[in-house]
């Protein structure tokens, strides 16, 4: 911090690495505090970040708290969220069994997942961390995927800029984010960005950070912007190999005996017998050495009972029995805020949240906190084995708390917005985790329901749910659950979205409910249709309809796939059945209209086009499709009116302008 950025020896990129518990987070947090005290603007990110956009948003939020908002980025992020919501908003259809759900037309392609599937292609530079996957894919397939996605988005969004924003949010948002960062750097002596737990976030952030910090993809950052990466392993050579000479490596290891003794002496622990016990018990792991030294034990009898576990030993120095009980039970949540703490801790310590946050094995996360993995793992094992009944009761109670908070949120949200709300997703994930810990066999079906829903939403959520299943499996010592988590994690990383692989895994589970199985087949059919794998998509739709013949969403997908294959009579049959079941879905009418148009039955096509436009009068796609039918019917004035209206709704969409040009040509007005 004290060096001049103009100095040739100045370092701006640091990598702290070492095994869990060696003090990486403590060191990074200390640097964070020191940097702020020196007048720097800082941001701290850990494994709560699951995407590049989440990383930029977290930095922006922390900067705003320090009085330097990234206004340009905040505005662009709000626009992205709005445009993505517009792109994803489907028409209502029916769920398996007849309940209301959300339709998923081909042209929107449930952009919640298709966006990641076809837009998030490393070959197009859109998703960091996926380069190896994209490299194994056919370049022509990548280009076709992008073209299909642009066509689908153009039907829902206002301009070409909006399409690019939703197609490539990282590329669209990063320049404005970096411009804001540079402006802050002009006004403050330093900016320091800390990326902790990088062994978890690296696969998501590696390539973006490389491009931003050392690459040529974007303009260089000001010299007074520093970055600190902190994780267990080395930086990924495939990503950083050409730039490692720019990285200042800071390896951390367990304490030497001299360092451990120095810390113990600083805590007032001087008895050689006590020191030997602590050194043996902790393996000189800094976080455990500090924990056991917390209450300055002075006589060996306090630590020499060989029957006590490591957990009991480092909690031994918390002498208040109520606080000790609180420290044990608060290891159960994945993370805590004050409300979760009050619901978890004994009543006698209900007001001791600040004390808990100050424990050396607890990391503060800006209002929330979490236990260090090295300490949490043995605490979890101890509580599970000591009293299985109490373990089940405590996890059930925590699940109920998150359920109550989730339901309270639902009172302010429409059903369509549940998965779009980060707080709702967080409560749902934690609720599911605790129910799995309380009873893996009973809760697995509900967890797989969430996995299917995550496939319908976005790749980041699928990955988050897969990781949660793995964590729940480890914490509950349930091998079946752990295998589920491992398989889904591998699936989510195996392709652009992982949705097809994850859905295939879910469909193999006997625990999947009938309704979820129907939706899973439909979603897999959608993903395959979007990839132009029509022959593979049709059996999936057929499987969904074999379970629920009245699932309009599957009927629509089947009909649209048949239309794309040129199977017009079969397409009409499926789409007509979909309309009979869900008469308010404009996409089924539009698809049937296009089928009639392909068959030369323009009058019937026009009737369906009119109905689609009536149901969604601001859809430029529906209006332009009707205009095209008018052109085939040589009703040029009406065709021009529709194409002009489509241009007004989406002035930057060249397809609408081209269609109007074709109409003029048909009229002889070249």
Image (cartoon, rainbow, N blue to C red):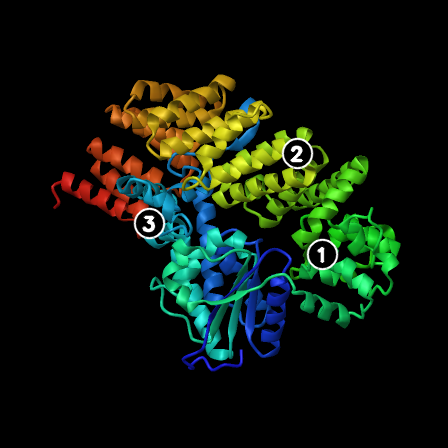
Give left or right: position of 436 versus 548.
right
Q: Position of residue 19 (x, y in %)?
A: 59, 56
Q: Is residue 125 above or below residue 592?
A: below
Q: Picture quarter containing residue 24?
A: bottom right
Element carrying mark 3: helix
Q: Position of residue 578 (x, y in %)?
A: 44, 24
**526 or 72: nearer the viewer:** 526
Dot placed on the residue nearer the N-terminal end, 1 or 2: 1
Residue pointed to by mark 3: 124
Q: Is residue 9 above or below residue 605?
A: below
Crowd class of label 2 (few under 14; some 14 to 19; many from 20; radius 10 Å):
some
Residue pointed to by mark 1: 282
**590 or 393: nearer the viewer:** 393
Q: Position of residue 344 (x, y in %)?
A: 78, 48
Number of the label disc, if any, that sits on residue 478: 2
Instruction: Measure the C-alpha gap from mark 1 to mark 2.
Output: 27 Å
Between marks 3 and 1 in the image, the one whose residue lies nearer the viewer? 1
Q: Kindly identify the residue that appears in the image at 55 percent across and 28 percent down.
A: 516
Q: Position of residue 430 (x, y in %)?
A: 66, 44
Q: Is residue 504 visible?
A: yes
Instruction: Measure the C-alpha gap from mark 3 to mark 1.
Output: 48 Å
Crowd class of label 3 (few under 14; some 14 to 19; many from 20; radius 10 Å):
some
């Amino acid at each position: 911090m004290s060096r001049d950025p103009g100095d040739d020896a100045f370092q701006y990129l640091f990598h702290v690495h070492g095994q869990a518990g060696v003090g990486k987070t403590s060191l990074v947090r200390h640097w964070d505090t020191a940097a702020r005290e020196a007048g720097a603007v800082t941001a701290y990110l850990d494994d709560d970040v699951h995407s590049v956009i989440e990383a930029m948003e977290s930095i922006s939020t922390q900067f705003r708290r320090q009085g330097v908002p990234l206004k340009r980025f905040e505005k662009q992020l709000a626009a992205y969220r709005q445009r993505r919501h517009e792109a994803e908003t489907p028409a209502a259809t029916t769920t398996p069994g007849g309940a209301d759900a959300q339709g998923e037309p081909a042209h929107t392609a449930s952009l919640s997942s298709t966006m990641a599937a076809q837009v998030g292609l490393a070959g197009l530079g859109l998703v960091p961390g996926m380069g190896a996957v994209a490299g194994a894919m056919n370049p022509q397939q990548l280009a076709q995927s992008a073209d299909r996605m642009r066509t689908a988005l153009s039907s829902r969004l206002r301009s070409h800029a909006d399409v690019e924003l939703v197609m490539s949010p990282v590329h669209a948002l990063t320049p404005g984010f970096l411009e804001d960062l540079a402006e802050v750097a002009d006004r403050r002596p330093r900016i320091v960005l800390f990326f902790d737990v990088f062994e978890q976030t690296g696969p998501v952030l590696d390539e973006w950070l490389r491009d931003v910090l050392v690459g040529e993809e974007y303009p260089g950052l000001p010299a007074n912007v520093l970055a600190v990466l902190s994780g267990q392993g080395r930086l990924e050579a495939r990503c950083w190999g050409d730039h490692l000479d720019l990285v200042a490596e800071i390896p951390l290891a367990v304490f030497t005996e001299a360092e451990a003794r120095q810390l113990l002496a600083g805590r007032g622990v001087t008895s050689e017998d006590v020191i030997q016990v602590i050194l043996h018990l902790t393996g000189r792991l800094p976080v455990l050495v500090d924990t056991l030294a917390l209450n300055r034990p002075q006589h060996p009898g306090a630590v020499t009972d060989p029957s006590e576990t490591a957990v009991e030993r480092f909690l031994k120095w918390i002498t208040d029995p109520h606080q000790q009980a609180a420290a044990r039970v608060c290891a159960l949540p994945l993370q805590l805020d004050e409300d979760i703490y009050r619901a978890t801790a004994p009543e006698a310590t209900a007001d001791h949240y600040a004390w808990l946050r100050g424990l050396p094995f607890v990391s503060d996360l800006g209002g929330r906190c979490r236990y260090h993995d090295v300490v949490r793992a043995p605490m979890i094992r101890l509580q599970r084995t000591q009293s299985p009944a109490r373990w089940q009761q405590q996890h059930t109670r925590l699940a109920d708390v998150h359920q109550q908070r989730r339901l309270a949120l639902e009172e302010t949200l429409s059903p369509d917005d549940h998965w779009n709300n980060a707080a709702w997703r967080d409560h749902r994930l934690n609720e599911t985790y605790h129910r799995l810990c309380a009873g893996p066999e009973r809760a697995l079906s509900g967890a797989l329901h969430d996995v299917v829903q995550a496939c319908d939403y976005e790749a980041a959520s699928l990955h988050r749910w897969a990781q949660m299943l793995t964590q729940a499996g480890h914490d509950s010592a349930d091998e079946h659950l752990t295998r589920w988590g491992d398989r889904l994690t591998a699936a989510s990383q195996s392709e652009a979205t992982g949705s097809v692989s994850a859905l295939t895994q879910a469909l193999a589970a006997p625990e999947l409910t009938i309704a979820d199985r129907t939706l899973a087949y439909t979603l897999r059919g959608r993903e395959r249709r979007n990839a132009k794998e029509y022959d593979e998509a049709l059996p999936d739709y057929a499987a969904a309809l074999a379970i629920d013949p009245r699932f309009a969403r599957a009927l629509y997908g089947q009909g649209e796939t048949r239309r794309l294959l040129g199977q017009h009579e079969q397409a009409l049959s499926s789409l007509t059945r979909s309309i009979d079941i869900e008469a308010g879905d404009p996409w089924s009418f539009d698809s049937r209209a296009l089928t009639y148009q392909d068959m030369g039955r323009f009058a019937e096509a026009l009737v369906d086009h009119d109905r689609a436009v009536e149901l969604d009068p601001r859809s430029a796609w529906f209006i332009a499709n009707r205009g095209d039918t008018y052109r085939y019917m040589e009703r040029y004035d009406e065709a021009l009116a529709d194409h002009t209206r489509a241009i007004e709704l989406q002035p930057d969409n060249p397809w609408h302008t081209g269609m109007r040009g074709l109409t003029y040509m048909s009229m002889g007005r070249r």
